Image: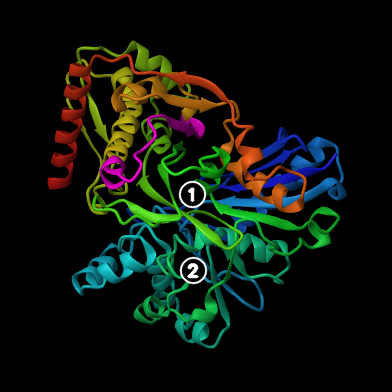
Amino acid sequence: MRYVLAIDQGTTSTRAILFDAEMRATAQAQEEFTQHFPQSGWVEHDPADLWATTLATCRAAIAQAGIGPQDVAAIGITNQRETVIVWDKATGVPLHNAIVWQDRRTADMCRDLREAGHEPMITHRTGLLLDPYFSASKLKWILDHTPGAAARAAKGELLFGTVDSFLIWKLTGGAVHATDATNAARTMLYDIRKGRWSQTICDLLGIPMQMLPVVKDCADDFGKTLPAHFGAAIPIHGVAGDQQAATVGQACFQPGMLKSTYGTGCFALLNTGDTPVSSTHRLLTTIAYQLDGKPTYALEGSIFVAGAAVQWLRDGLGLIKAAAETQVLADQADPQQNVILVPAFVGLGAPYWNPDCRGAMFGLTRGTGPAEMARAALESVGYQTRDLLDAMSADWQAEGVQPVLRVDGGMAASDWAMQFLSDIIAAPVDRPNIHETTALGVAWLAGMRAGIYPDQQGFAKTWARQTQFTPQMDDALRQSKYAAWKKAVQATLSV
């Protein structure tokens, strides 16, 4: 029996999942780590926490399965995207905490670059908007605000990477400084059409190109782990950013196929094939996956707050003790109240892209309580998803968006949230048998490269639906509720 070890390094926790030769999850371990909020709108992680939880969960999963490291054919890494780490090339010591994708500290920098007229060039090359969400401005901030960093980077003493690059570097003992095309495509430094780092953008931002990792396919040779880590050297054969890994795990291999992942944020990707489609509705053009040197492109809509709204109910307000309670509360909510939460805690993502607005709640009455607030939090995810799908349908007209949405992520386990999602988008929602599609996607990439998993066509045949949710809501009510949402968003944006 041969196994593949999938590392899923997320925004709030790190998981390691072992998949057997039949691509079944047989063991897993998970550890949360501390979130740091130095100022309003700033979000950081300690890179030491990312590394320590990765090492600990991998060891725990292997031990739980009762196997040895020689039984692991390959490792796959999937990760929170856009998060930035800069470290010393000689010692591996980070210069600064990791600046997380949610962080908004570079909003003014991005605004200045936009006002200077640089956004059209950046968007054409990278497919991205000039926004603090992406890695480039965060990297520039570290170089500008860490004494001596810019000079050291120019001398070749510092390395930059997204989380995957940092973990690869640590796992291989500094032997490999690499990333994959999907993570590179999220940095705002990578030309997705030419398949290389953009000298023009790096020069504009003062980023030395020798800091940047080598860009590889999603299924490729990323080196081997040091034997000291797990007891034997294990090859790293698969890497993909978390949303792209979920797209692969959902087998969205045909143009027009669509998936949406509900974790801390929500991310919808629409496969557009070998054509990078430029959005006129402020969606992102990105790389869905790259195999054999050939990129497959996608349109992506990014929502910053999905599951994080439920975490806010739990940790910020203390209204619930566990996420599952929201479903029970939502069922109990007064149907006559239409409380709307616009969860712009760190600004709004697609299709609005406003980093400055903040969250708001509308429709409160003296009768509003935890049940109505829980329902509003779950409904906000459905409303935001409809915003994305409407924009995608307008942008992608060559073959059309397929009418079924494949969903995954923690919040996809909520029947209430998924039924409302189907109701508000007026389309079927398919939840697969395997919920851990992000880890599965990168496990398949690594296992396929290692020769123990089937090819792309064979993998697509293994996808199976667990539940399909179909629209039950009256169309008049659907349109009324969505109109109220749009009004609430406009009010939030105007503050």
Indicate whether residue 95 is drawn in magenta.
Answer: no
Q: Decide if residue 368 is on the left or right side of residue 307.
A: left
- Report the label total: 2
Residue 364 image-quadrant placement:
top left
Name the one closer to the observer, 355 or 389.
Answer: 389
- In magenta, the rendered stretch is 391-411
* Separation (CA) of disc 2 from disc 1: 34 Å
Q: Decide if residue 374 is on the left or right side of residue 251.
A: left
Which residue is identified by label 1?
A: 35
The residue under label 1 is which amino acid type?
A: Gln
Q: Residue at x 61, y 60 (%)?
A: 292
Indicate whether residue 401 is drawn in magenta.
Answer: yes
**Residue 495 seen in render:** no
Residue 145 image-quadrant placement:
bottom left
**Residue 440 seen in render:** yes
- Where's residue 268, x and y in %? 40, 42
Q: Residue at x 57, y 37 (%)?
A: 437
- Where's residue 29, x and y in %? 69, 38
Between label 2 and label 1, give the one nearer the viewer.
2
Estimate how packed mark 2 is, as few (under 14), some (14 to 19) or many (20 or more) residues with alpha carbons within 10 Å. some
- Where's residue 277, x and y in %? 35, 55
Q: Decide if residue 197 is on the left or right side of residue 358.
A: right
Q: Decide if residue 442 is on the left or right side of residue 96.
A: right
Determine the secondary structure under disc 1.
Answer: loop
Name the one closer to the observer, 388 or 325.
Answer: 388
